[in-house]
Image (tube, rainbow, N blue to C red):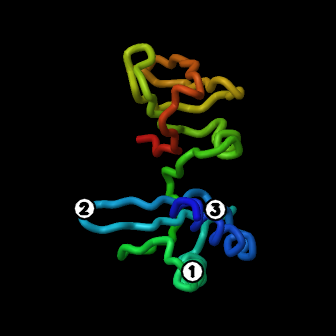
């Protein structure tokens, strides 16, 4: 059997599809002494707490029925919306974010910085153009996509 994330993704995809929800991300992480299995779902107009509860119930039953147990240690299952600062994981996430304010973290410095926040103006398979406000002056940075460690929507203050 594959990793916990792969196993849970395979289990939750049909549940999400049946409910017309989009699977945004699955993560299995240790924080302090506890393990967390987090499933992020969304849909046009946002996901409700009842939908989260329904997915949690169905997914929990499916996980409990697996033998051998893919997660032998105790963990907390959390099913939620990705929130206002939704991660950009795949091509369609980036395409939907054109025109939006985003946060980008890089593996290495580019023009002296490892983090950028600005408006995603355009993208290609290799790069994205981000318009950044630098003390009242706008500058567009072209960032290689393979240099991006993480990207997410951001709230502009």
User: In the image, is 122 to the left or to the right of 83?
Assistant: right
Please rate how many residues cluster around mark 3, counting C-alpha atoms within 10 Å: few if below 14, some from 14 to 19, many from 20.
Answer: many
65 above or below 46? below
Q: Nearer the viewer, residue 128 or 147?
A: 147
Q: Which residue has dot 1 on it? A: 66
SS label for mark 3: strand
User: In the image, is 33 to the left or to the right of 92?
Assistant: left
Q: Give how far across and how far down residue 6 sits, in percent.
A: 59, 60
Q: CA distance from mark 2 to mark 1?
A: 27 Å
Residue 95 found in image quarter = top right
Observer able to see residue 50: no
Q: CA distance from mark 3 to mark 1?
A: 21 Å
Q: CA distance from mark 2 to mark 3?
A: 26 Å
Locate the N terminus by quadrant.
bottom right
Mark found first going from the N terminus, 2 or 1: 2
The residue lying at 39 percent from left, 67 percent from top is 36
Q: Nearer the viewer, residue 69 or 53?
A: 69
Q: Which residue has dot 3 on it? A: 23
């Amino acid at each position: 059997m594959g990793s916990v994330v792969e196993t849970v993704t395979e289990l939750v995809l049909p549940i999400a599809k049946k409910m017309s929800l989009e699977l945004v991300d699955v993560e299995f992480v240790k924080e302090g002494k506890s393990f967390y299995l987090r499933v992020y779902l969304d849909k046009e107009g946002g996901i409700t707490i009842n939908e989260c509860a329904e997915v949690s119930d169905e997914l929990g039953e499916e996980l409990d029925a697996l033998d051998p147990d893919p997660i032998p240690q105790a963990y907390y299952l959390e099913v939620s919306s990705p929130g206002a600062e939704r991660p950009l994981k795949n091509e369609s996430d980036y395409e939907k974010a054109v025109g939006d304010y985003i946060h980008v973290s890089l593996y290495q410095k580019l023009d002296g910085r490892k983090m950028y926040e600005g408006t995603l103006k355009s993208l290609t398979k290799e790069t994205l153009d981000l318009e950044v406000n630098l003390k009242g002056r706008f500058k567009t940075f072209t960032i290689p996509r393979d240099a991006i460690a993480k990207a997410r929507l951001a709230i502009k203050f």
